[in-house]
Image (cartoon, rainbow, N blue to C red):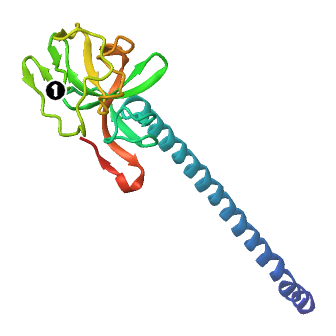
Amino acid sequence: MSSVLHKRRGKIPDELPAIEQLRKELKRERYSQRYRQVLRSTVFILIVVAAAAILTAVLFMPVLQIYGTSMAPTLSEGDIVVSLKGVDFEAGDMVCFYSGNKLLVKRYIAGPGQWVAMDEEGNVSVDDIVLDEPYLVEKALGECDIEFPYQVPEKRIFCLGDHRSTSVDSRNTMIGCIADEEVVGKIVFRVWPLERFGPLQ
């Protein structure tokens, strides 16, 4: 009997490495499962955040790149700006809108029913009140083929570029007044270049 016990006890040290190996293997498997779960959760969260960011950008805050010089010196070619949808405009606000298949940025001047006038020197008045336009470097009558005073039609807005001598805008029938459904939003922020990063007026 004692010899049998001795033999059984003698086997225990031989079995310990196998048990320890099994424990390590189980630990590795549990770690691997936890890692996969965390990885799946992280990927899912990143997808949701990216989708939310894209949806927000498309629906509420479209990001645009500026082409051309019609808004110089306020905006330069290559600037990247953020617009805000669903806001009311005041004279002097920058507006982005579709014209054909292009996105343009101009300065909001007047809304439906208001009377706009420009003199030979490029001074702009709305309803007989001359606008203060500190964002302009120089005034000019520019590319104008409409007759002033001009009344803005219903459901449309009158917009001008800051570079008045070269900008093609609501003074010209090529662009004309902007329909409500063509308006994307108000330009509120510049994100590029970094040295000019900040809110826009």
| The C terminus sits in image quarter | top left
The picture quadrant where one finds residue 13 is bottom right
Relative side of 111 to 35, left or right: left
> What residue lies at 37% left-to-right and 15% top-to-bottom?
175
The picture quadrant where one finds residue 3 is bottom right
> What residue lies at 42% left-to-right and 43% top-to-bottom?
79
Near mark 1 (Cα within 10 A), the count class, few <14, some 14-19 or many ≥20, is some
Q: Which residue reaches farthest front?
A: 120
> What residue lies at 46% left-to-right and 42% top-to-bottom?
78
The picture quadrant where one finds residue 7 is bottom right
Q: Where 118 sits versus 31, above or below?
A: above
> What residue lies at 22% left-to-right and 39% top-to-bottom?
135
Residue corresponding to mark 1: 123
Measured as percent of width and height from the top left, residue 54 is found at 47, 36
Check disc 1 and give the amino acid type.
Asn
SS for tag 1? loop
Measured as percent of width and height from the top left, residue 6 is found at 88, 91
